[in-house]
Image (cartoon, rainbow, N blue to C red):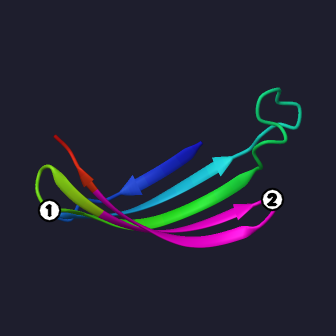
Amino acid sequence: GYAQIAYSLGKYKPYYRFDFLGIETDDPFFAGLVEDSVQNSVGLRYDWTTFVASKFEYRYLHADSADSHFGVAQMSFAF
């Protein structure tokens, strides 16, 4: 599951997202393939126009096997 909050400040939209993934040990499909994890993301979206936006995001992932930090930059177009 996940929860996200965001607030629009004109063309800017800062946001925070919390993701949680918990797989039961007896799950017939995902047990052994996917590990439990918690991810926190914070980012900023900028709307260039109605159809173009940029997003910059920092993610921290805490998983059973290891922790990781990474950044993401995205440009999206809609039509």
Measure the C-alpha gap from mark 2 to mark 1: 39 Å
Residue 51 horizontal side relative to residue 64, left or right: left
Residue in the image at 32% along x and 63% along y = 55
Q: Is residue 69 magenta?
A: yes
Percent across and percent down for residue 68 are 66, 70
Residue in the image at 18% along x and 55% along y = 52
Q: Is residue 46 above or below residue 78?
A: below
Residue in the image at 15% along x and 63% along y = 10
Q: Residues within 10 Å of mark 2 (few under 14, many from 20)?
A: few
Please state, as top left, top right, bottom left or bottom right, where the C terminus lies in the image: top left
Mark 2 residue type: Asp
**Which residue of the protein is positioned furthest toward the left in this rendering?**
49
Percent across and percent down for residue 35 are 77, 49
Q: Which residue is mark 1?
A: 48
Mark 1 residue type: Trp
Residue 46 horizontal side relative to residue 29, left or right: left
Q: Residues within 10 Å of mark 1 (few under 14, many from 20)?
A: few
Residue in the image at 14% along x and 62% along y = 48
Residue 28 horizontal side relative to residue 10, left or right: right
Please state, as top left, top right, bottom left or bottom right, where the N terminus lies in the image: top right
Q: Secondary structure at mark 2?
A: loop
Q: Which residue is mark 2?
A: 64
Q: Which residues are magenta?
A: 55-75
Percent across and percent down for residue 45 are 29, 63
